[in-house]
Amino acid sequence: MNFKAEIMDEKAIDRALIRISHEIIEKNKGIENIVLVGIMRRGVPLARRIARYIERIEGKKPPIGSLDITLYRDDLSTNLEQPLVKKHDIGVEVIGKIVILVDDVIYTGRTVRAAMDAIIDLGRPKAIQLAELIDRGHRELPIRPDYVGKNVPTSKSEIVSVMLEETDKINRVVINEFYL
């Protein structure tokens, strides 16, 4: 794998998240009924950052949950004997709420589909919206984010890597070339 380009630095990430925060407030006419749910791993710190920006704007922080979609993925190996399925607790109530799923990169749409399945298993939300820091295209499912930090057209041989202070000790988004 070879480094190709940096597409966002720390300031660009912050600007994108501030814009997404404003768009969430505007689209939902405030934050009264919203819940932010970060998709593990990097969606969780992104959801926390968006919540902080919303709090600065609105004076109130929306509830934040985290979601592990591992057992909902359609590419989970069928070689497992019996995966252990635990009662799911994302830390927030979703019934009747506007759930905003937050993730770092949308690619095929399969992660988002799995996240929607997991959310619906918890109860029926009023609506599900999607916030992504990066949309790199190549969708395999008819899923489109409501909020996008940056659209980055990529080839399938490229990998978009989001690095965040909370998980990687640095804030930047890069594209790497993957050679088979």
Image (cartoon, helix red, strand yellow):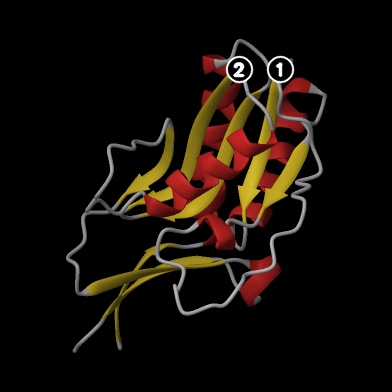
* Residues at marks 2 and 1 touching, judged by CB atoms closer than 8 Å: yes
Query: Residue placed at 45% from the left, 46% from the top?
Result: 112
Relative to residue 11, is residue 36 depicted above or below? above
Q: How far across and how far down the image is residue 84, in percent?
A: 69, 67
Relative to residue 13, is residue 170 depicted above or below? below
74 or 152: nearer the viewer: 74
* Residue 68 visible to an observer of this rendering: yes
Badge 1 marks a residue whose secondary structure is: loop
Q: Quadrant of residue 164?
A: bottom right
> Which residue type does callout 1 highlight?
Asn
Q: How far across and how far down the image is residue 160, in percent?
A: 36, 67
* Residue 17 visible to an observer of this rendering: no
Say how many tags the image has.
Answer: 2
Q: Rate crowding at label 1 as few (under 14), some (14 to 19) or many (20 or more) other CA atoms within 10 Å.
A: some
Relative to residue 91, is residue 107 depicted above or below? below
Query: Residue placed at 59% from the left, 44% from the top?
Result: 118
Query: Residue placed at 57% from the left, 63% from the top?
Result: 70
| Left or right of 98 in this view: 129 | left
| Left or right of 47 in this view: 79 | left
16 or 48: nearer the viewer: 48
The residue where tag 1 is placed is 33
**Quarter of the rendering occupied by the C terminus:** bottom left
Q: How far across and how far down the image is residue 45, in percent?
A: 67, 55
Badge 2 marks a residue whose secondary structure is: loop
Residue with the most extreme top position: 29
Label 2 – label 1 distance at C-alpha: 9 Å
**Quarter of the rendering occupied by the N terminus:** bottom left
> Which residue type does callout 2 highlight?
Lys
Q: Nearer the viewer, mark 2 or mark 1?
A: 2
| Left or right of 75 in this view: 138 | left
Numbered badge on residue 126: 2
Q: How far across and how far down the image is residue 177, in percent?
A: 24, 80
